[in-house]
Image (cartoon, rainbow, N blue to C red):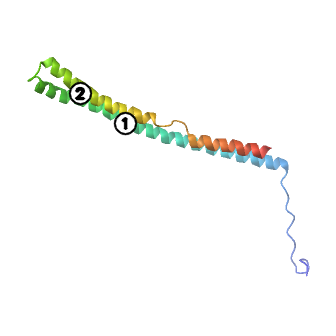
Amino acid sequence: MSLSEMGETAAPPRREPAIGELLSDLASQTSTLVRQEVKLARAEMMQKAREAARQVELIAAGAVLAVVSLVVLAATAVIALSAVMALWAAALVVGLIIAAVAWALVTKGVAALREIDPLPREALEAFDDTKTWARRQFQ
């Protein structure tokens, strides 16, 4: 028994899209993909900027502590050491100790900042993949 005898009709033949439609769709999809990759790169850069800001906070905390230490502890230490050495020598010793601590804090923050990769590696990889995909589509 055929489909027409059963009262059913065959599905209409599927129309294949024209080359122009395919190229238009490809251009549209490529454009969307590139926009999404730019969005990803922007998000990745924002994440890296937030991480850098955290490290800058370490540097700032080190600098503030250095100033506070210089004011509060320096006077006390100089007075205490002046009992066993000349006043100028006591001030020099205290100043060098405070400078060493401040240097260590700032050095730690700068080293952490240098470890941050500023390039959006994931977005660049995705963009390279998109370029490769687009080249294959146009071949």
* Residue count near mark 2 (Cα–Cα under 10 Å), binned few <14, some 14–19, many ≥20: few
Quadrant including the C terminus: top right
In front: 57, or 12? 57
- Under tag 2, what secondary structure? helix
Residue on which the image places disc 2: 97
Quadrant including the N terminus: bottom right
Residue on which the image places disc 1: 57
Q: Which residue occupies 31% across, 33% down?
A: 62
Q: Position of residue 6 (x, y in %)?
A: 88, 81
The amino acid pointed to by label 2 is Ile
Q: Position of residue 105 (x, y in %)?
A: 32, 33
The amino acid pointed to by label 1 is Glu
N-terminal of the pair, mark 1 or mark 2, is 1
- Could you say which quadrant of the image residue 35 lies in? top right
Q: Which residue occupies 85% across, 51% down?
A: 18
- Under tag 1, what secondary structure? helix
The answer to whether 24 appears left or right of 56 in the picture is right
Which of labels 1 and 2 is toward the front?
2
Q: Which residue occupies 21% across, 27% down?
A: 71
- Could you say which quadrant of the image residue 14 lies in? bottom right
Q: Position of residue 107 (x, y in %)?
A: 36, 31
Establish if 64 lies above or below 17: above
